[in-house]
Amino acid sequence: MRIAGLSLVLGALLASASPHKPTRHTCQTARNCPEGTILVSKTDPSAHFKNVQDAIASLPNDNTTQTILILPGTYKEQVNVTRSGPITLLGQTDHPQDATKNRVTLTWAQANHDNTGQAVDNVFSSVLTVAPTLEASYTGSGPTGYPVPEGTPFGNVNFRAYNIDFTNTWRDYSAGPAHAISLSRANGGFYYCGFYSYQDTVYVGKLGNGYFHKSIIAGQTDFLYGFGTAWIQSSQILLRNCGGGITAWKGTNTTFTNNYGVYIVDSTVQAANASIAPEIRGKCALGRPWNELHRSVFAHTSEDASILPSGYIDWIISGAGRRNKNTVMAEYRASGPGFNATGRRAANVTIVMDDKQYARYNSPAKVFQYPDGRLGNIRWIDDKP
């Protein structure tokens, strides 16, 4: 019995002395990373690359899972991901579950025109673009956007970013579309990240699926927009000023019933800082419809006093509104000083959903779809970040 007991004790000691299997947290905090992890740093001599785009370009064009660890610093570059195999970008941090303490920033300063002043598609402004082809990422113009060619492949099946800030510093006010990220025909998960611009901060394009967890998204005008599907979970929506609306979705007709739209859940909507709060009190709209198939829902979300009494507004072009019976501009169990039930009823623009109405959209599995319309496209989401 003594020998058996001693064996158990020795086994436990050996197990405790053995190195821990690398995890996301150990990689980010102690550089104990999975084998094959690529290191990016502007200053560390042990790094494989000095910028992120070169690291992305080095990856094999296959379905293997690849991880890139980015050491602290500001990286002034545009990053373009076309690879279909899973990619994880990790920002080094001592606080892997706190977006306010991120130490890695990818930044660029551009709006939707080139250096000659010629207008170009919005995507050319983006700090990060995830899409299989350039055409797949085009926003285009008008309520239906760019007609992506038939047969365009689906792009990255599982793109992930953790603890990275994406900032477009074109202007410190709305001065044209200036993306922080652009995601089209791809699945992208963003965890404890920051997205900062003023106009069109986050674009989720056609067949794009974007999941945002405990992240920070800041903007002024239509800064959540697109044709695809975005689920924003337990995050902060920061109002840097008021213009247009927070959301400006461009719904798409399909041969199947779709749930394309943006869903802001268990989150907060608030003025970006104490100095701007008095200026925008009661002036900011939750959204406006880029076309009649706009769909956005603020659910279980706290809204500060920046929000208009009406909640949403219509988009009036040449005297005609874009909102009709197909438009979904909604709230479900919203709270805070920005939720004015009397104002919502009087304006009759915002749908205040009941349990039955919200049931269609009440989980990621019910809104994220495969390209053929099947629901339940959620295997790429990190459910324990």
Image (tube, rainbow, N blue to C red):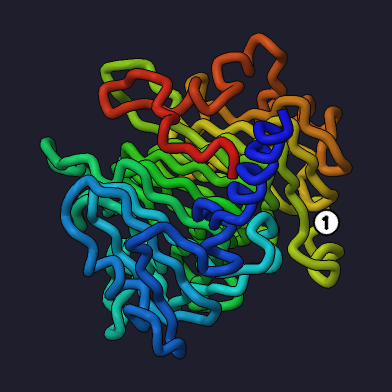
Residue 277 against residue 160 in the figure, above or below: below
Q: Which of the image's four quarters has the N terminus? A: top right
Residue beneath the point at 58% across and 68% down:
30
Q: For the view shown, which residue lies furthest in the front direction?
A: 2
Considering the image in quadrants, where does the C terminus appear?
top right
Q: Which quadrant of the view contains residue 2? A: top right
In the displayed structure, would residue 352 be above or below residue 303?
above
Instruction: From the viewer's perspective, tell me whether residue 345 is left or right of residue 256.
Output: right
Number of marks in the rendered image = 1
Name the residue that disc number 1 marks.
281
What residue do we see at 52% from left, 62% from top? Answer: 27
Quarter holding residue 109 = bottom left
Please give the name of the residue rendered at 55% of the width and 67% of the height, measured from the top-left corner.
Answer: 165
Inspect this view and state whether residue 122 appears: no
Percent position of residue 172, x then y = 60, 77
Q: Amino acid at mark 1?
A: Arg
The percent position of residue 50, horizontal first and vertical second, equals 36, 83
Label 1: which secondary element? loop
100 and 285: which one is in front?
100
**Left or right of residue 48: residue 6:** right
Give the camera-side residue of 362 and 103.
103
**Near-viewer residue (243 or 161):** 161
- Give percent across and percent down for residue 25: 58, 57
Residue 283 vs 328, above or below: the answer is below
Residue 170 visible somewhere in the drawing:
yes
Q: Residue furthest top?
A: 356
Residue appearing at x 55%, y 16% in the figure: 360
Residue 248 x, y percent position in the rendering = 51, 45
- Left or right of 373? Residue 190 is right
Circle 1 Cα neighbour tier, 10 Å, few/some/many (<14 / 14–19 / ≥20): some
